[in-house]
Image: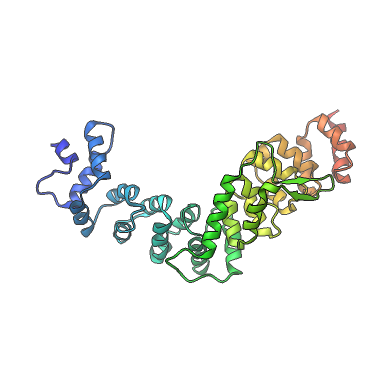
Amino acid sequence: MKMLAARGIVPGAAPPDLLAILVVLSEGDSDVARTAQGTLRALPKPLLEGALSGELQAGVLFELAAIFATDTEVLPRLLRMKALDSPTLLRLCQSASEASGEIIATNEALILRYPEAIEVLYMNPRVRMSTSDRLIDLAVRNGIELEFPAFKLAAQAIKNQLIPEPTEEPTFDDELYKTASQLSHELSLAEEEDVCDEDEEGKLELKKKFVPLFAQIQDMTVTQKIRSAMLGNSTMRMILVRDTNRLVAEAVARSPRLTENEVVRITASRSVSDDVLRIIANSREHTRSYQVKLNLVCNPRTPFSFASRLVPHIRSNDLRAIGRSKNVPGAVSRLAVQQLSRQK
């Protein structure tokens, strides 16, 4: 009987109840579970239509979210279900395509009920740039404070820009963002490579192979650059961290995708802003690395209050080098000498 039910055959059961049975039977690793899982992935259209015409339970909706997140015909009907809860909506947002992300974002009442969905859609690289802008604008207009990295930066940038009206077709900005993202993934940094060559005086020259990507980024709006800093790869972040707009540079420092190697390169550069170095110096995760601590102490752009806090963590041989270096601020150099004396 269970095997028949796993194949979708339960005489007398209404479609919503049959889906609930399939979801229960799909749990586990038995033959029955595998059969039920296969039936769920390829639901007969009459069964699906009958089930969507009624009200489905929350657990059933959660399983359907994994299957129909990109189906633009089924998705709107799932969003109208009374039992739709936060975990199901977040699952839909996480797997959404460009088109389905637009469908979810236009349902403002649902988004305001579960504002955590804004973060998931924003961090989904398939969601349009114009869609993510409207979501941030929606949160700002309704006084919603979100905790994900760089929300305040994006919200501040949104306030200074005209938000486009909702559109069904990708905008020029969407295409520009997509093109730049594709180009950034075609370019890859070597293990210790930077996008710029920097001389002893800190003057920068962009490497030739990164010029096309730099040109694309230059044409982006501030909000596009902030989202690129959050979702882009290391090549894009290493360009954006030197952006003249403070919000963009800070977004790179707050990006959850920032790796230790990138932080080492950023803290070693004298062309990044002191705001970026301050954010990194305040991060326990980033300052676990000894090389990052050493770079922050040696970088003349690191605010003295942060550099002085890290001097006690520097090894003796490096303290001697800092004490003799002419490229380190005098106050930091003297502090290094004092620390070395205390260690002796």
**The N terminus, quarter of image:** top left
Q: Position of residue 281 (x, y in %)?
A: 70, 45
Vertical order, 241 against 284 (above or below)? below
In the picture as drawn, the residue positioned furthest to the left comes out as 12
| Residue drawn at the location 65% of the way across and 45% of the way down | 283
Give residue 339's quadrant in the image.
top right
Vertical order, 173 against 250 (above or below)? below
**The C terminus, quarter of image:** top right
Q: Position of residue 311 (x, y in %)?
A: 79, 39
Q: Position of residue 89 (x, y in %)?
A: 38, 54
- Residue 254 seen: yes
| Residue drawn at the location 16% of the way across and 41% of the way down | 5
Query: Which is more toward the observer, 135 or 212?
Result: 212
Horizontal side of 261 relative to 115 (left or right) equals right
Name the colour scheme: rainbow
Horizontal side of 274 relative to 88 (left or right) equals right
| Residue drawn at the location 23% of the way across and 42% of the way down | 39
| Residue drawn at the location 86% of the way across and 46% of the way down | 329
Query: Which is more toward the observer, 27 or 237?
Result: 237
Q: Position of residue 285 (x, y in %)?
A: 63, 41
- Residue 257 seen: no
